[in-house]
Image (spheres, grey):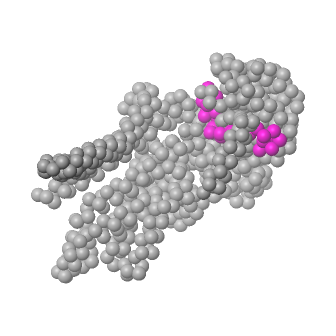
Amino acid sequence: MVCFSFCSICLFAVETMNTSQSPTSSDDGMQSVNMAAIAKRQHLQDVVFHRTTQSFSLLVLIALVGIIVSLFFNAWPTFAKFGAHFLWYVEWDIINQEFGAAISIVGTVLSAGMAMLLAVPLAFGIAVFLTETCPVWLRRPLGTAVELLAAVPSIIYGMFGLFVFAPVYADYLQVPLQSVLGGMPMVGWLFGGATNGLGIMAAGIILAFMVLPFVAAVMRDVFEITPPILRESAYGLGCTTWEVVRKVVLPYTQTGVIGGIMLGLGRALGETMAVTFVIGNANRMPTTLFSPGTSIASVLANEFGEAEGLHFNTLFALGFMLFCITFVVLALAKWLIVRTEKAKGS
Amino acid sequence: MLKMKSFVAAIGLSAIAATSWAADITGAGATFPFPIYAKWAEAYKKETGVGLNYQSIGSSGGIRQIRAKTVAFGATDAPLSGADLDKDGMVQFPAIIGGTVPVFNLDGFGKGELRVTGPVLAEMFMGKISKWNDPKLAALNPGKRLPDTAITVVHRADGSGTTFNWTDYLSTVSKEWADTVGKGAAVKWPAPTSVGGKGNEGVAANVTRTKGSIGYVEYAYAKRNNIAVMALQNKAGNFVMPDDETFAAAAAGADWFSVPGMGLSIVDQPGAKSYPVTTASFILMYKTPVDKAQSAEVLKFFDWSFKNGKKMALELEYVPLPDALTNQIRQRVWNQINTK
């Protein structure tokens, strides 16, 4: 926007300069009149262009405000009835019209958090391998594979999760984990419960699969923009690959890496279909990693069709909560970036 | 290019022409009867050229849509009360009968090889009976070796008429269920092991995948996918399996006009052969519709389907309404709809 207005000012200045240099002959006079007309037309074009693009970007703002307002408006009866208590109320009883957001907020945060715990180190490893140590002939096919993984629709992940992953996960991960760690003090309770292949942890693992390509692709792209001269200087000083990544590449690309992680987290928080398939859809507070639970997005996907009255309003309230969670996450990321920039600057 | 344009124009014109003499009927609601409505609609369109645009968005959605007057009829599995119907100026009639069946996955047990009663089912779904070798189950299945496996309850995660039918039945046979859980398109499932699956297919997938699980699905779904079904004790004390005959037996004794708006629940009906978890799916229409021509078309469609759609219904494992009942619907319900 600024650029365009700047351009138009420049053009205008050039045109007026031309006209001010008006020579004496009548022929040149005609020309300067023509020039003025052109300048006027170009100025008009610029204004139209400026306003059009401005209205496009305003459209986004209007849509955003419209969504927030309509969410809040529809959610109001629930907020009015339960107040702030709604946030930590552990109840979801449609028949008695008692609703709380705690169960689904915990499910959402836990499954997304677990996904990030698994996906971020993996993505980091993939990106480092692709940019630092991967043989050149393998770079392109591997990179494309990662990008392709990002293009798989989420329902496919859900079906894969339920029909292929869950049985394997139940027999070869849940059962061994439970028998080995289940009896341990301190952590044993984490692995209690039925080993049926569904639950918070299953959802977390499937989500990790889903966000992995996003995070990995972004990390790879930002690692690649590290100036070769920096990298080569570090190697020249005798740094190991790890030292180059740790001391040169990561500090240089910090902002981009955090951005990539946030992109992945955003997707994990809002993911609907894949989570619905494997999270177990139980409206109870999860007590172990294997407990079935529910996330905000999966509750919305499951219950919207048959919701009425306060239940309907409560689903909007949950949607509003998801909006808030995402907003908080983005704000935190922004703050993190600003803080690290500052720390570097001082 | 010109050829292309005229071709497109021709298609456009023919589409306009088609819609001008055959405006589609619009309806929305229950997912439970969707397969049969779709099948009837297909056959009806072939014969009359009038299509049906039915959106299976769920019963509550159907009620919302008909109240908003965006559709000519709404469809719901849970009937509206007489008072609600009067308030909105609507009539309600059953269109098709079907059933919900308990399915399970237990090594060594196939279709009909496990017997349960309503109260025992309620206790299993409440989590009070948590192992397959519970004495109550053993007493019902003498001579069978029941394993010491934990029971995993699988229920519908989405709101559904199937869940309404199932919890309606459990509420009827178990006072404790009625008091603590109740009935509805979605309820608060009490069993600590319960997990939810999305749609009949989600429940079926979880049951077939999980050893020691029990769930409930629409009958057609269990039959077509060959999932093991339990034999269920009916009110007369007999253990029955779900099929056309036992569903029809349950519907036979029903006195539909005993309840205002015909909103009768036909779970746990008397009769030696009656299958206990049987339900009707209902149609909602306005007495004085805004679009009278559309409503007339809707009545024509159901009239045709009641007459010609019986075989199609049976093929899809539904039970068509008996002639005596459809005649009564024509005379006592449809005459209240003003289509002129």
Q: In which quadrant will I find the C terminus of chain B?
A: top right
Q: Relative to the observer, which residue lies in front, A230 or B264?
A: A230
- In the shown orientation, is residue B122 left or right of residue B143? left
**Which residue sits at x=83%, y=41%?**
B47
* Residue B191 locus on image (x, y percent): 58, 43
Magenta residue check for B50: yes
Q: Is residue A149 above or below residue A16?
A: below
Quadrant for residue A87, please give it.
top left
- Compare residues A94 and B214 and report the one nearer the observer: A94
Magenta segment includes A193:
no
The residue positioned 60% from the left and 34% from the top of the image is B61
Residue at image position (75%, 31%) is B298
Residue B36 drawn at (x, y percent): 76, 42
The part of the chain drawn in magenta is B42-67
Name the residue at 71% across, 20% down.
Answer: B287
Q: Quadrant of residue B21?
A: top right
Return the residue nearer the eye: A139 or B254.
A139
Instruction: From the viewer's perspective, tell me whether residue B237 is left or right of residue B199.
Output: right
